[in-house]
Amino acid sequence: MPSGKLDGKVAVVTGGSRGIGAAVATRFAEEGASVVIGYRSGGEEASELAAKLEGSGARCLAVKADVASPEQTSALFDRTVEAFGRMDVLASCAGINHFGGLQELTPEMANQLFGVNTQGQLFAAQQAARHMTAGGRIILTSSNASRRSIFQHTLYAASKAAVEAMVRCLSIELGQRGITINAVAPGATKTDMAAKNAVKYQPPGLGLSAEEWLSLSYALDHVATPAEVAGAYVFLAGDDAGYISGRTLQTESCVF
């Protein structure tokens, strides 16, 4: 049951129109936060979610912003402070996936992946911190792919591993201002992106279905739901995580 852990806080959730981001926005609102849902292309979904959360008594706003654009990212946080008067929590959930062999990779692919997954999160953290005071919470999103050897998943894994390095280094700088920064590294989660790519995570030639492979790969007996993963963001956003910074929280143990 919600316990008001985020009462009075103002939170921005990038990539908040669907998947893990939508679940995080929902949980933040349930815990008492005013929530800004950042989205790039899911305008209808973001507006519907904002209306649903407002109908439940939360203050909520949907704002279009492509995190690959530093200018749009800056405007997102300016709009947040304009609407709600402060900025307390960032949950950076926007991201894109990629599979491809070494000889197929192009500079354009690398620029796109790192532009969203790495640079997009770096500048979201920068702009959030610009408005935060002591007690601020920045939560980025990595992936368990950053620690695993996955066939033809090089660009994505590298873009997420860089996020964990940023979190470690920025924890020192932001800690001087009383702001924590951490990351969540989800495993397999029931999202549109996972449904499209789940079968690709197994070694080549194994030939299992996505469900068979996932059931063998993780310690728990089911693939996570976005709501289950969102709990990690709620924890890191709250007072109980006030002395945790520079860390990456994995949501589930990978067997393989």
Image (spheres, rainbow, N blue to C red):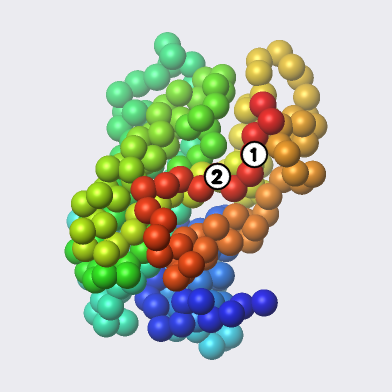
* Residue located 55% across and 27% down the image: 148
Residue 122 visible to the viewer: yes
How far from the left and from the top, in percent, is residue 229? 60, 55
* Residue located 51% across and 48% down the image: 249
Which residue is the site of mark 2? 250
* Nearer to us in this view, 154 or 249: 249
* Nearer to us in this view, 129 or 99: 129
The type of residue carrying mark 2 is Gln
Label 1 crowd bin: few (<14), some (14–19), many (20+), radius 10 Å: few
Position of 129 relative to 147 (above/below): below
* Residue located 72% across and 45% down the image: 223
Q: Which labelled disc corresponds to residue 218?
A: none
* Residue located 68% across and 50% down the image: 224
Res 230 → quadrant: bottom right
The type of residue carrying mark 1 is Ser
Q: Which labelled disc corresponds to residue 253?
A: 1
Q: Residue furthest front?
A: 243
Dividing the image into 4 quarters, which one contains the C terminus? top right
Res 253 → quadrant: top right
Residue 92 visible to the viewer: no
Q: Are marks 1 and 2 in contact (CB under 8 Å)?
A: yes
In-image side of 156 versus 135 (left or right) = right
Position of 162 relative to 64 (above/below): above
In-image side of 225 versus 101 (left or right) = right
